Each structure stands twice: as structure tokens, then as C-alpha cells.
Image: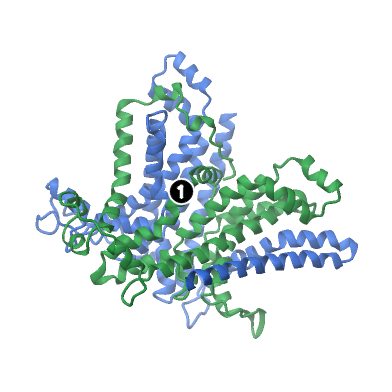
Amino acid sequence: MGTLLSVLVTIVVGLGGLLLILLGLYWLTNFLPRSWRERGRIAVFIGPTLFLLLIGLFIPALRTIYTSLLADPPKSKFVGLKNYRDIFAATDTRLTVFNSLTWVVVGTAAVVLVGLVVARFADGMRGENTAKSLIFIPGAVSLAGAGIIWGFVYAGPPFKVGLLNQVAKGLHLPDSLGGTGDRLWLLERGIGGITPPAAAPGFNTFLLIVIFMWASAGFATVVFSAAIKGVPDTLIEAAKVDGATNRQTFYKVTLPYIRATVITVATTTIIGGLKAFDIVAATTGGNFGTSNIAYSFYFAFFRQDRDGLGSAFAVLLFSLVIPVVVVNRRAQKRAAEIAG
Amino acid sequence: MTTTMKAPTANETMGRSVSAALSSRPGRIAVYILVFFWTIPTFGLLVSSFRPEQAVKTTGWWTAFIRPHFTLHNYSQSLSSQPGSDDLAHYFFTSIKITLPATIISVGIAALAAYALSWMDFKGRDWLFVAIVGMLVVPLQMALIPLLRLFTHGAHIGHLAIFPYLGLKNNVAAIWIAHTCFGLPFCVFIMRNFVASLPREVIEAARVDGASHLTTFGKIVLPLSVPAIASLCIFQFMYIWNDLLIGLVFGGQTNKPIIAKLVDLVGTRGESWHLLTSAAFISMVVPLIVFFSLQRFFVRGLLAGAVKG
């Protein structure tokens, strides 16, 4: 009970303190000269947001860009773009970048596809809401938790809990451990005797992307589903009257109508895939060639003490987000024009 | 990024004749297969978490139904604070201590900003809103480390302290501030869009009656914004509870949230790795309860939040 009490006290003191500060500042505006009073009150309302964004986001981001141009401590002298060149020069860090791109391309395509399939075919089906809820549940738990759930599915010897090995055994799939149906799925980059080159994503990276897809598809499903239900009945009926099949109606009417939504979901998923650090941390810890940019960022700072390199990874992540957002905005505009 | 999502209508819960005709047998089968594939990993771990240690270690969970034997022992072991146990109850409370205030602070401060951006007149107001929302594109990785250094060292130019050393290393307030900073662009975006759409006559009537900004905000804007606040709070709550990176970096050992503890366990469990099963579910129970009990609000927040970057 002692813990519970201290938690309560912390919460009450923290929130109460903040409230008192804000009310106090507002009260102080009463003592400002009349012409400044309104300005003071505006500052009390908008000030906390601007202050926090300035010290918590804007200045730190500039600082990270600057640090990415410095050598790693303790020397910390200006080295220009050396950290970025290092990322692309070394095989393991280059693999990191390729892995992230694979997450983005394969992961996003899979998420959008699954989301569209479920949203389309579950629409109007008996048990539609249950189906959508079940698909969504993985999206409600943490990505780290998702990683652990799938860590058990992928588990290999000596652990017997691995469902995937059980399925592989049932299907008599050949494996790399002497034909027992036991494979260390997350540890092996190759599959079926083929090992990818050192700078190309391994099969285990695709297994991690499956976790990402599993965790993200619920969001896509829910959003697509709402969009599909927003298509006016008159449009669907008109297509039917003209003799369009279900398939034609979906591709020629529904899909173009919800185009903007598809673009939005794809953008969100791409950015989510770029930032997905949790799944790697909870499964392989970036080993066995499975690291991605977001994980390498963490690893460089906290395991290698390489601030310059870590900052370069952060800026690289940022520079990959920007074009996605720009393309998204253009596509949204075009979609809006088409929709009239 | 700024396209507003269509809100779910009454149609959402009712099947429609037109759409029902769109669903075909192969399509339905595809949905069933996907639902099965989406459910089985979680279900398997849930079953494992109720099995005795010996059973988890020697057989797969799918064998549990042949000779059922279930126990709560893993859970009591995970939650216990005995030496050698994981003491997850402690980390669970730490997560609450982090998540509740961080949610309220970020939504509250965003609500204040939303009021200023919608109903207070000043130069550059719209430009400021665009700038705040523009911060959505900055990944938190860009700001994480410098913000951490600010809390642990303060800021100096030469020997001149421009930001004091506040002794916030691994302090829970530092985690609140970090979550608030990173969540603000999104929260301001959602709150401003809602608050700006409130009827002008209501706000102006209050002004005519001589209500101050504080009164207008507290007595009129906040109560009218409850739907947006509820959705946003649930969204922020889930986001902060499920966060790993900020908890790992800002929590340290003293204020480690349960998700960060869970990931610690992955590498260090050794002999008692079977306890990872119950630990995972203890970390998931709060988001799952929130999801199932407040699904309607959550989905609404999600649709509005389809823009989160």
C-alpha cells in the first residue's frame, strides 16, 4: 500500500503544482499595465506550449544536427559529413539502412494490403466488429510486447515453445539444423541454403517485419473500414445498375474514393516503420544483422558511446521522413482534386 | 497530412444491404484466416503464461489441452517483490505514475494553446499554428539525447548557465516533460481543430457577459470539448503506456516503466525465462482494458489521429 500512496502523492503534487503555477501566472497578469494585460494572458495560454516545444524539440533537434557533424567524444571536433560517410562505408551500418528501407517498403505494402482485404471483405459480414477487434488487439499493446509474443512463436532449440518450428516440422520443411524441424529463426540470416550478401537484409529481418505488420494492420483496418463505409450508397448502387461486378465496383468506385485515406495510412505506416525501435529491442537486440536505423541510433548512443554516429542516424531518420511527408502532401492534393 | 478523416457514422455498427452484397465467400474465408493468424500468437502466449514452469519448458502450449493443468504461479512469481522475483508490481505502479500525469499535462497544455490559437487575437496566430503542427515531422530521436543532457547537466554557453541544472536525472517530472514535449504537436493539432469549431456565438456571449479568458476557458470551452479531450486522453494514455524509448532513456533504474522492464527481462531471464509469459501479459493488461472498455472513444481518436507522424 505504501507504493500506491506514494504514486498518488506524486501524481497529485505534480498536477496540483502545475495547476497552481499556471493559475498564479494568470493572476499575476492582473498587475500588468492595462495595455499589456491581454498580451500577458495570451502568453500564459500559449507560452507553455511554445516554451516546451522550443526547449524540448526545436533546439534539441538543431543540436542533434550539429552533433552529427562532430567526431565521437572525447575529441568532439568538427569532422563535417564523416559520420554519414561512415554509415554507408561500413557493411554493418549500411545493412542497417537497407533493413530500414525494407521495413518501409515491405512492411507498408503488407499493412495496406491486409488492411484493405479485411476492411473490404469484413464489411457487412456477420461478426464484422469482432473480426476487426481481433485484428486490432495487437495494435493496442506495445510493440515491445508484440516482439515478445512473436519471440515465443519464433523460438528455436533448446526451447520447445516455438510454434513456427512445430509447423515447419509438421510440413516437413528442410532446415539448417539437420532435418529435425528445429531452426533458430531469428538468428539465421539465410534460408533454404541461400545466404544473402552481407549488406542485404536477411530472412530474419523479414520475420521482424511480420511482427510490425501484425501490430500495425489493425490501425489500417479500422481507418479503411470507416472510409469504405463513408462511400455514398448511391455511387455503389449506380455502379451496380450499370452492371459492374463486386470486384469492378471495389476497384473502380470504392478504391478511388478512399484514395486519400490509403495515402494517409501508408504515410503513417512508413513513418512508424522507420521509427520501429521497440520490436528490434525486444527480439534480437539488433544482433544477427537485424538492426534498423532507429535501433542503431539507440545502440550508438547507449552501447557504443558514439554520440556523433548516433546523431547522424537520427538525422538520417529525419531526412527519410521529410520526403515521405512532402510526397504525401502532394498526393493528398491530387486526390482532393480528383475527388472534386 | 492534414486531411481530416471521416468520422464513423451510425452505419459503422449496422451492416448495409449494399455492402453486404460486396462480401463474397472467398473474401470471408480470407478474413477468417487473417483473424486466426492475428489471434494465435497472443493466444499461445496467454496459454503458456498459465502453465506450470516445467510444462512451459518442455512442451509447446498447444499440448496443454491434452492434459490441462493451469496455474497462476507464474503471475504471483512475476508480481512478487521477493529477492529473485521480478517485482513487476513496482514497475506497474511506476508506469501509472508516469502515464496518468503525462497524459493530463500534455492534453491540458494543448487545450490552453488551442484556446489561444482559436479565440485570442494576436498577430501571427495562424502562422504559429502551422509552425507547431509542422513539428509533427520531427522524429523524437532527433531531440531525445539533447533533452536528456539538458535535464542531467543544464545548458551552458562557456561558463554561463543559460538553463539551470535542475537535478532531474531519472526524475519522474523529467519523463512527464519529455512525453509532453514530444506529444504536444499532435495534441495541439487535435485540440485546436476541435476548439476552433465551437460555435462563435457561445464564446462571444460569454465575453459580452464580462467573462475573463480563464472563465471562458474553464466554464465553456473545456466542458464543450469533452468528446475531443476524452479521445485524445485515451490515445495519449495508450501511446505513453506502450512507449519504450522514452522510458528506457529517461527512466533509468529509478523510474523504469513496465515496458522498459519487460525488455530488460528478455536478455536477462536465464533459467526463469518462462516468467516472460506472465510478465508480458501484466504489461498488456491496462491497454487491453482501456481498449475493450473505451473502444468507441479510442477508435474515434484513432480516426482523428490518422495524421500522427
Horizontal and vertical percent for residue B51? 23, 58
Q: Secondary structure at mark 1?
A: helix
Numbered disc 1: what chain?
Answer: B
> Residue at left 58%, top 34%?
A336
Say left or right for A212 vs B213. left
**In this view, A250 is above or below B208:** above
- Judged from this view, the residue extending furthest toward the front is A1
Hue used for the chain lettered B? green
Horizontal and vertical percent for residue B164? 64, 79
Q: What crowding class fits label 1: few (fewer than 14 Cα within 10 Å), some (14-19), or many (20 or more)?
A: many
Hue used for the chain lettered A? blue
Check the image and tell me how it is coloured: by chain
Say left or right for A133 vs A43. left
Residue position marked by numbered label 1 in the rendering: B291
Picture quadrant where residue B80 is located: bottom left
* Number of marks drawn: 1
**In this view, B236 is above or below A224:** below
**In this view, A65 is above or below B163:** above
> Residue at left 71%, top 68%?
A21
